């Protein structure tokens, strides 16, 4: 039985999050795969005679009958050797690790079941209004209730257009941009387009380049987008507090020359914004903590771009399992001959780094901050953890029709 | 009235810091500008019928009559559009942000009024005595009272020649150097020329390469300056404590070939040392915390070099608004093909990074550590913040004759 | 008297660590030198009429008769000028620095006397069993008592094969590798080959790619070593805790093409693994804190490679005195045109950096983390400090026959 097909009626659908598990790893219109994800989800099928679920490839789950029966046919051959043996050993029932393992497994189950789809998507592009030769973005600055995780109480936060991170603003080099911010807070603020070269009066530093934006007032930032690359917009007023509470978002300027955009230059079919923070709400990626962080899902052979942006107060070294990252730009500026390859990339506060990943190895690959206390605690992984799911074409099942949401924004290359 | 001309008699001169506000942004002999700075200072003119001062370009200050009248003609056209509107909105008098804003504005006023000129200049070059083929520097190691900020009580610190950072020592590659340190402390010490290749006995690590320098004693470090670039000298004895209290300074070795010096190689007309610390006295740049940090002042079109040096215990990512930094050397070694461009540069303890900035955009550009709690608190900006003031030639007013001090040392290219 | 010759009978041998001081700086089979080390050790010779010991070159120790007489002839000429004077000054007996200095000197004496040789060597290569075309490594995962320093109580730690760091696993690109881990802990675990490209089921992330390895059970990781360079293996299960307690080791994959290995490519005659941690046991290099850290010992003119690996939770900027580091690879990937030279290299958690050092300056060169509180405290240097001892050929004395242990592993270039 292919429980991943849209019309399947697996018991998973009867739990309190119907339709979530099946779309957990999918991006609408961009994916037609199911490989490793299929294995994981297949293992969710309940069974009275077996543990309720087991993740991972069939090999590791070999001792778990239900997983083996459900997942065996989908498991990639190279990793299916049955003799690695972890699950052959009996668990020590007196082990103090039992609670850790149960909790650790539970959060991973939530992640793989699509926890991220229970919350609004991050970094959704905001479509500008076109006024003559100008792209006009209208945003509000709001007090919001923000959930780091659907199971946790919301935190009192701030957001642009009600979300943290704020909407993705994407334009093309040379565009005339007007960004109107209406301040709905009970405090003053100012908005800095970090990394963008603007006239001084548009720099958003209250008391130096402008008056603070009063509660109820608006301010219009107007400039020509002259600095291509990965940039940000965020508060530059009482900023430790205001950025810490969520006043931050991505500002992407596509190069005017289409040949220089990642889809053409690197053949990238996904272009993903990854904003981290480490203040209110703890260790977050795009405003969520594991297991509510969104996985990146790619087809085997696909090339993706990730734009790391650090809006927190600490350096975070991002470690991708399984595949290296080719680091091609820093703060929006192409590295050229200084480009390099790595698997762990330290990103300091305020920096942006663009990396290209060739997804040439199928599987669910952990992707996390390698300051381990930012990623794992006594109850399992949390905070700055997600995964890159590379789906094997051989096992691909098209789920686009299931209405799966896009986990990550795809940045319009045309602005 | 042009209150910036040397013979002006604005009311500003009657406050307790006469002559300071007018020279706040100026470097003797190196500047002939007043553009943005003029706007800011113009706004200082008191008026019974208006807020006492308003900073920023005329556009943002448009609602403030005095600022508008005094500054309008100097405001750069591109940023003067009157419809951005922050100050059009009434302030919410009940807002909890009022205190923040008042305090935040007040510290910025102090900065722009030239707070840094109230304290001794940092990184002043020490002229060596020439003894045959040797350049001899004589320094003392002292207990000092050091002010991070003129309004704060001095801290009990340490300094070379009585200052923190110690005097700038600048030589030319191949020079024979003799640096005599007289220890006036009540404790032992040792001086390490960090980054310089010296004979082992001159390395300044007590108990390994020499005996500690006793109270009252002197030690002579003698070597040929063979490692060009940005280096440091500091205590290497009980160093967490002694460097933390101020025993640190810059040691610059100009390349023997003049064509390789920044003035020739990059056309730089300013060469600025930027030493950060984060221990005694908090977050400092060249021994001062904002608003007592010195701004960097450049004319529009000028190229400057900044040499970041970290003598603290934390990485600091320096973010320059408005213009990118071209990073050309690391620890004194030219990066060559590995050079890169960025707007945020993480500098780890012990590292030195040389960057070139082409000052091609007029205005007052914030320049700060992007670990926000190192730069801004509930009472506004503090600590690791300064500004790059780029003065528009069109509005330039020569103030060189006013005897304005150099905020930053200009490193002699001839040693 | 040459107290460094194997048949010397200096009083040093009568203390509680016989044979240690004489072999302190030596690597079996790789060294035939004694230059600076000789000076230091010579100074250990007790004398009723002099301070019991004085370190450093003869110049600095000039005021100490025993050191002068023992060491003068060995001191390198350029640093032997007798007029630098630190020890000419009387000590201030009332100085609060006395205790600091006595303690600081004592730990340095312990270091230079070969403290590291009192404890098992780190990073010892584990010879694989060859099974057909496969290299088989058999490891246990153990609870251990681990000493950061021979004078400190052991800490309750974890280790692979009973040691922290675990044994060095070295293979050649293209090798088929089987690593069998037997879990002797009372808790579950999993092993991740960090940086190595493996099939997903071999990635070692419990609950995602495999079941946790139960107490008493084994798990076999099997893959083709396809990613050359400096990599690691460590726990990826409850990892903040398990890696923090010592479940970590180096995994080196030599390039298949011998011309690309450091011995051929860079002429390196030593290839040294440097794993840092900053959790259990404090600030450590290869599982030891200063003075129990092993010095690196090289002959004058020798080229060495150091592979920095950070298994801790903080960035550490490694600063080498005396000679620059040429940084040639990051996370195992050659930097190519992005290679650079520096003397201070920040290494973030999870990162690996390979550097080449041309040992062209004789002496004992401090080598430490430049976050000073990780390296020096009120009682002198501790934690993340070691030294690069470059032995002058002119003073070389062959001690290979004294059975001196290798402080650092030399990585087999043939796997």
Image: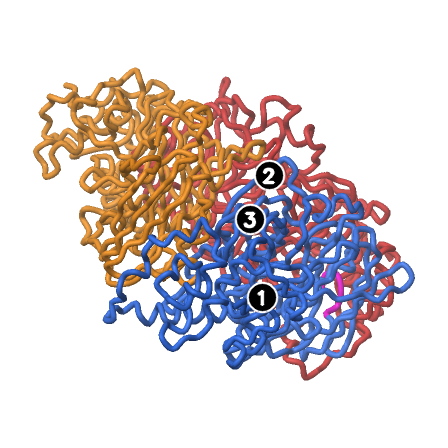
Chain colours: A blue, B red, C orange
Cβ–Cβ under 8 Å for marks 2 and 3: no
| C-alpha distance separating marks 2 and 1 | 28 Å
In terms of depth relative to the viewer, which is nearer, A254 or B389? A254
Q: Residue furthest top?
A: C394
Question: Crowding near pointer 2: few (<14 within 10 Å), some, many (20+)?
Answer: many
Q: Where does the magenta region start and end?
A: A206-212
Q: Earlier in the sequence, mark 2 or mark 3?
A: 3
- Tell me which chain the residue with mark 1 is part of: A
Residue A240 - label = 1
Q: Residue furthest bottom?
A: B94
In three-dimensional space, the C-alpha distance between marks 1 and 3, rounded to whole angstroms, equals 18 Å
- Position of residue C267 relative to residue B82, above or below, is above
Residue at 37% across, 20% down? C78
Does the stretch in magenta take in C313?
A: no
Chain for numbered disc 3: B
Q: Which SS class for mark 2?
A: strand
Q: Residue C316 versus residue C68: which sits nearer the camera? A: C316
Q: Are marks 2 and 1 on the same chain?
A: no
**Kind of element beneath mark 1:** helix
**Within 10 Å of the Cα at label 1, are there few (<14), some (14-19), or many (20+) other Cα atoms?**
many
Residue A97, by quadrant, is: bottom left
Q: Quadrant of the C terminus of chain C?
A: top left
Residue where numbered disc 2 is placed: B354
Chain ID of residue with mark 2: B
Q: Residue at x 24, y 62 (%)?
A: C186
Does any portion of residue A220 appear in the rendered image?
yes
The residue tagged 3 is B346
Q: Give neighbour class at mark 3: few <14, some 14-19, many 20+ (Cα, 10 Å).
A: many
In magenta segment, residue A210:
yes
């Amino acid at each position: 039985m292919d429980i991943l097909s849209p019309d399947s009626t697996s018991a998973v659908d009867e739990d309190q999050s119907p339709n979530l598990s099946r779309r957990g790893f999918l991006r609408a219109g961009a994916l037609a795969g199911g490989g490793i994800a299929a294995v994981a989800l297949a293992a969710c099928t309940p069974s009275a005679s077996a543990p309720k679920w087991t993740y991972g490839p069939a090999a590791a789950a070999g001792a778990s009958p239900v997983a083996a029966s459900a997942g065996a046919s989908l498991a990639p051959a190279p990793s299916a050797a049955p003799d690695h043996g972890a699950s052959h050993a009996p668990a020590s029932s007196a082990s103090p690790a039992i609670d850790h393992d149960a909790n650790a497994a539970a959060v991973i189950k939530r992640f793989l079941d699509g926890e991220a789809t229970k919350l609004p998507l991050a970094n959704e592009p905001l479509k500008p209004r076109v006024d003559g030769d100008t792209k006009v973005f209208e945003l509000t600055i709001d007090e919001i209730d923000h959930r780091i995780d659907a199971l946790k109480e919301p935190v009192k936060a701030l957001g642009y257009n009600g979300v943290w991170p704020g909407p993705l603003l994407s334009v093309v080099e040379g565009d005339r941009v007007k960004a109107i911010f209406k301040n709905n807070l009970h405090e003053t603020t100012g908005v800095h387009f970090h990394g963008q070269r603007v006239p001084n009066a548009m720099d958003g530093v209250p008391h130096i380049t402008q008056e603070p934006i009063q509660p109820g007032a608006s301010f219009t930032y107007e400039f020509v987008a002259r600095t291509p690359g990965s940039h940000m917009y965020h508060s530059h007023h009482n900023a430790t507090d205001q950025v810490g509470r969520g006043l931050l978002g991505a500002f992407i300027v596509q190069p005017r020359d289409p040949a220089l955009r990642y889809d053409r230059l690197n053949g990238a079919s996904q272009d993903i914004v990854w904003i981290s923070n480490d203040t209110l709400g703890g260790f977050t990626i795009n405003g969520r903590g594991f297991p509510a962080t969104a996985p990146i899902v790619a087809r085997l052979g696909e090339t993706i771009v990730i734009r790391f942006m650090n809006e927190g107060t600490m350096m975070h070294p991002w470690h991708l399992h399984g595949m290296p990252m080719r680091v091609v730009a820093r703060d929006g500026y192409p590295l050229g001959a200084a480009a390099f390859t790595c698997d762990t990339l330290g990103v300091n506060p305020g920096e942006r780094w663009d990396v290209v990943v060739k997804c040439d190895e199928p599987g669910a690959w952990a992707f996390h901050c390698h300051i381990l206390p930012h990623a794992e605690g006594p109850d399992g992984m949390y905070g700055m953890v997600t995964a890159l799911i590379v789906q094997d074409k051989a096992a691909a099942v098209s789920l686009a029709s299931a209405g799966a949401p896009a986990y990550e924004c795809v940045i319009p290359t045309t602005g």
